């Protein structure tokens, strides 16, 4: 009987110790991480669970590695599959929540804004400066970039939709460019299907060119369709568009902030004071409003417009009225 009592006592003691050890292990997994402020942590691609646990301990994010190593031994089949990427670890997060985070798709994201009216070169510059973005196109020409995107015969200007794009570390500039290209194609096809009958535009690409001119001429919401109306009427009458942004685009790096009379007379493929019709390509990245205005111009009889100096324009029906507006808003200013 004494031996039986001793055995029972020992069994109870072992059970109590085992339960205590288990409870303590569980409490360490439920304990908060050992950081006082949000901490960015990156799970490297291909790193093992044990390597990440050791690294978390070395970085001081978790106080000790052993509870996580025990978890790996007793829960091999249910062990979280850690995902490569950057994660923001918050103070107060438990060890279990930490493992859940590192195995989720809640990676840290960054954003890149491409404004309406930028050129493709402007966009490439922003991509080159974007943090954590893989630079796959750094040494490529514009032609090589388009070939890499699968469109070797296309001029890049205007082909990419201006917007804010989200990405995470490991995404490449080519990934952003593909998104922006596909977005522009979708938007352009959408507005082309809604175009007015009788437009002097023969293709979606000509609508894209028109939209780029509108984008560069005005940022005023209520003026885009009016600007489009002037351009359409001039095309219908065989008049040259005579829009300054095409002169500037044709000058390239020679433009230093001012257009002279000689610049207006200078023959470039884009100078609409010299060439007839639309320029050969877009001159900027147009946004949705400019695309919609290009295929839905406002009715009216204005054939001229001049900047008033406050971002808006004065519209005129006749050349004499336009010249008077030029004297008022440009020469006197």
Image (tube, helix red, strand yellow):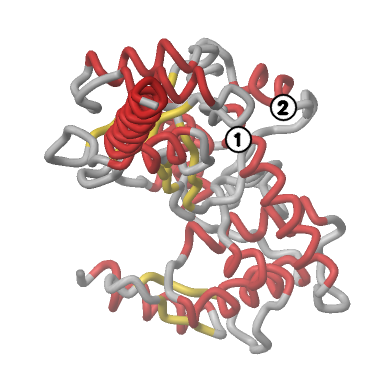
The answer to whether the residue labelled 1 contacts the one labelled 2, judged by CB atoms less than 8 Å apart, is: yes
Image location of residue 8, percent across then percent down: 39, 30
The answer to which image quadrant residue 240 occupies is bottom right
Left or right: residue 18 versus residue 164 is left
Instruction: Report the residue at 52% width, 10% height from top.
Output: 139
* Residue 321 in view in this figure: yes
Left or right: residue 329 versus residue 215 is left
Residue that extends furthest to the left in the rendered view of this protein: 36
Image location of residue 1, percent across then percent down: 39, 27
Q: CA distance from mark 1 to mark 2?
A: 8 Å
Return the residue at label 1.
Answer: 177
| Front residue (pair 196, 112) | 112
Instruction: Report the residue at 75% width, 55% height from top.
Output: 186
Left or right: residue 148 versus residue 223 is right
Return the residue at label 2.
Answer: 149
Instruction: Report the residue at 57% width, 79% height from top.
Output: 226
* Mark 2 crowdedness (10 Å alpha carbons): few <14, some 14-19, many ≥20: some
| Front residue (pair 61, 269) | 61
Q: Earlier in the sequence, mark 1 or mark 2?
A: 2
Query: What quarter of the picture does the C terminus occupy?
Result: bottom left
Left or right: residue 36 versus residue 87 is left
């Amino acid at each position: 009987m004494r031996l039986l009592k001793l055995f029972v006592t020992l069994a109870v003691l072992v059970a109590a110790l085992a339960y205590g050890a288990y409870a303590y292990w569980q409490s360490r997994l439920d304990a908060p991480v050992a950081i006082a402020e949000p901490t960015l942590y990156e799970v490297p691609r291909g790193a093992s669970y044990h390597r990440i646990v050791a690294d978390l301990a070395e970085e001081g994010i978790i106080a000790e590695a052993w509870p996580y190593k025990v978890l790996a031994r007793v829960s091999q089949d249910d062990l979280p599959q850690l995902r490569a990427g950057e994660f923001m670890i918050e103070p107060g997060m438990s060890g279990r929540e930490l493992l859940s985070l590192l195995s989720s798709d809640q990676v840290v994201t960054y954003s890149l804004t491409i404004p309406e009216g930028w050129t493709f070169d402007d966009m490439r510059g922003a991509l080159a400066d974007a943090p954590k973005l893989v630079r796959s196109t750094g040494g490529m020409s514009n032609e090589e970039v388009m070939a890499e995107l699968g469109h070797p015969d296309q001029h890049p200007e205007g082909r990419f939709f201006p917007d804010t794009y989200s990405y995470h570390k490991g995404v490449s500039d080519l990934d952003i460019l593909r998104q922006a290209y596909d977005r522009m194609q979708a938007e352009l096809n959408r507005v082309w299907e809604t175009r007015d009958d009788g437009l002097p535009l023969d293709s979606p690409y000509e609508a894209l060119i028109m939209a780029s001119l509108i984008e560069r001429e005005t940022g005023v919401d209520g003026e885009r369709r009016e600007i489009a109306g002037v351009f359409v009427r001039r095309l219908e009458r065989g008049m040259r568009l005579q829009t300054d942004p095409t002169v500037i685009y044709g000058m390239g790096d020679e433009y230093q902030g001012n257009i002279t009379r000689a610049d207006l007379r200078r023959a470039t493929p884009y100078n609409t004071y010299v060439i007839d019709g639309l320029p050969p390509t877009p001159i900027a990245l147009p946004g949705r409003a400019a695309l919609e205005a290009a295929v839905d111009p406002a009715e009216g009889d204005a054939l001229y417009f001049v900047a008033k100096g406050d971002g808006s324009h004065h519209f005129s029906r006749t050349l004499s009225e336009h010249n008077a507006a030029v004297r008022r808003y440009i020469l006197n200013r």
